[in-house]
Image (spheres, rainbow, N blue to C red):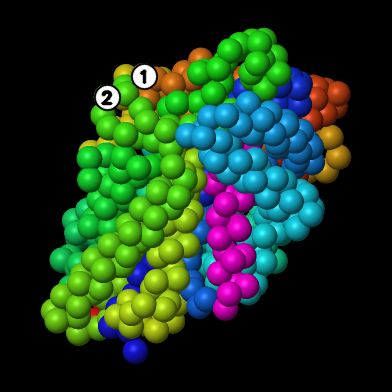
Amino acid sequence: MPKGYLALVLHTHLPYVRHPEHEFFLEERWFFEAVTECYIPLINVFESLVNDGVNFRLTMSITPPLMSMFTDELLQQRYSKHITNLIELAEKEVARTKWEPHFHETAKMYRDMFIEASRTFHDRYHRNLLNAFRRFQDLGVLEVITCGATHGYFPLIGVKKESVRAQVGVAVDLYTKLMGRKPKGIWLPECGYNPGDDHILEEFGIKYFFVDTHGIMHADTQPKYGIYAPVYCPSGVAAFGRDTETSKQVWSVNEGYPGDFDYREYYRDIGWDLGFDYVKPYIHPNGQRINTGIKYYRITGKSNYKEPYNPYRANHKAALHAGNFMFNREKQIEYLTGVLDRKPLIISPYDAELFGHWWFEGPQFLNYLIRKIACDQDVVKLTTPGDYLDEYPVNQMTVPSASSWGYKGFHEVWLEGSNDWIYRHLHKASERMTELASMFPQAEGDLLRALKQAAREVLLAQSSDWAFIMKTGTMVDYAQKRTKQHIHRFTGLYEDIKWNKINPSWVAELEYKDNIFPDINYRHFLPYRPVKSSIAVNL
């Protein structure tokens, strides 16, 4: 019998980027790169674990924008072209490096990786990778949860509670449609929690969510078990706190595993290193150099000097780090068992894109870790928050504090000088959407189509990604353009709907461009009337 539990939580998210009006849109490569370097490698790891009969349980949040991109035919077609081009480039690299032994094995590794990615995408899952995650959920190895409809930051858009309700309601509707069941849990975008939002989660049947460490530790009453057991909010929805020790081991710039000098260097790519004429067919058609995904150097050190990457050495290091991570969890659990009167739970959440994209060896680290936990010890067992609540249905009731997992732990990342201007527009749009929903609660025909599109535009404008990008200073023009574009489109629809001047051809154009949530229920924006409830049980 295990002495305690570890819950690995992978938050899987990208902003909704789909531009049918442009054949080659740079930001769509965010999705293509993540599919090749993160999502398919994780799928292949899960496949190998299932095929080998390894007993494991993981939690993954797959956000509605990402679910929508997985199932979009246009993006599926474009990814098919993308991976075909990568295979062609990798074949050329195998030939080019034939007499460069320090690069040749790595070139063959990329060729094999891209061919395997194509097989997984085309042959196993027929271009729809969401089917893979649904399969793993049905097999009982993944607990897939949802997120806000467009990853809106609840504490700030929640000035209008209707926005939070719509973000949750639309997300639950899409999840139910695509996954064949209702979600048990939700990843609050950016772990952004505002006290009282849990009542909205309860309304839609959500059983649990996550907060950062201080969200639990600064709750209105002292948590008896700290972050090593969930607490119930007054609504009866459980909150789980992030463990700081496991976070530091992976996330820390100075101490985390991904910074090991034997691992692949992310910032050296042949798209920049090789001759322009050679890479031209594989970069942007306008001649802009971009990452191809083929990188030949290891981190080496903190200077600009880099040595060739050795895949075998890096793979060995991933196994060593997995063993170290497991050893530390054993010692952590053994200590906690001595001071708690129940089996402790360690919550370890990470951005899924870390594994494979930023940390190339991350999927293999997870592969080794899961196998070691299953076979090499009996102290720690992998579990999910839903499973833990089934085993321990009685928990302390308290109110977690307002918090996020962003810089400084609160709201500063999404509300500061570079991005604060967006919120007056988001709040006004939400207020107007509620006005429209109240005026036309039973719309049909062109009016219904216009109302649904208006709701889409509000949700797309609310994406926390745009404020985050403005703060970090990368692709700022694109983030500002997307925010203004969706607000402008919504405002035009609002005026047309309110004054009965709907232009069906313009609505059709917007449906073509912003086609997320085809079955959206605009009535989720109706005035929010909170229902107070308390079904949690105190210890």
Q: Residues within 10 Å of mark 2 (few under 14, many from 20)?
A: few
Q: Secondary structure at mark 2?
A: loop
Residue 47: say if magenta. Answer: yes
Q: Quadrant of the N terminus?
A: bottom left
Determine the residue located farthest toward the front in the rendered image: 99
Q: Is residue 433 left or right of residue 320?
A: right
Residue 521, percent from left and from top: 69, 48
Q: Is residue 374 above or below residue 42?
A: below
> Is residue 38 something one can see in this rendering?
yes
Residue 71, percent from left and from top: 73, 47
**Relative depth, front residue between 202 and 43:** 43
**Relative depth, front residue between 314 and 326:** 314
Label 1, on which residue? Answer: 418
Residue at image position (67%, 60%) is 132
Residue at image position (32%, 57%) is 321
Residue 94: say if magenta. Answer: no
Residue 237, percent from left and from top: 41, 67
Quadrant of the image occupied by residue 276: top right
Task: Kindly report which numbered mark, 2 or 1, lies closer to the viewer in this rendering.
Answer: 2
Q: Amino acid at mark 2?
A: Ser
Q: Which mark is residue 303?
A: 2
Q: Which mark is residue 174?
A: none
What segment is highlighted magenta in the picture? 30-53
Q: Is residue 407 left or right of residue 204?
A: left
**Relative depth, front residue between 284 and 528:** 284
Q: Is residue 498 above or below residue 230?
A: above
Identify the main secondary structure in magenta: helix
Q: Amino acid at mark 1?
A: Ser
> Is residue 165 something one can see in this rendering?
no
Residue at image position (54%, 23%) is 270
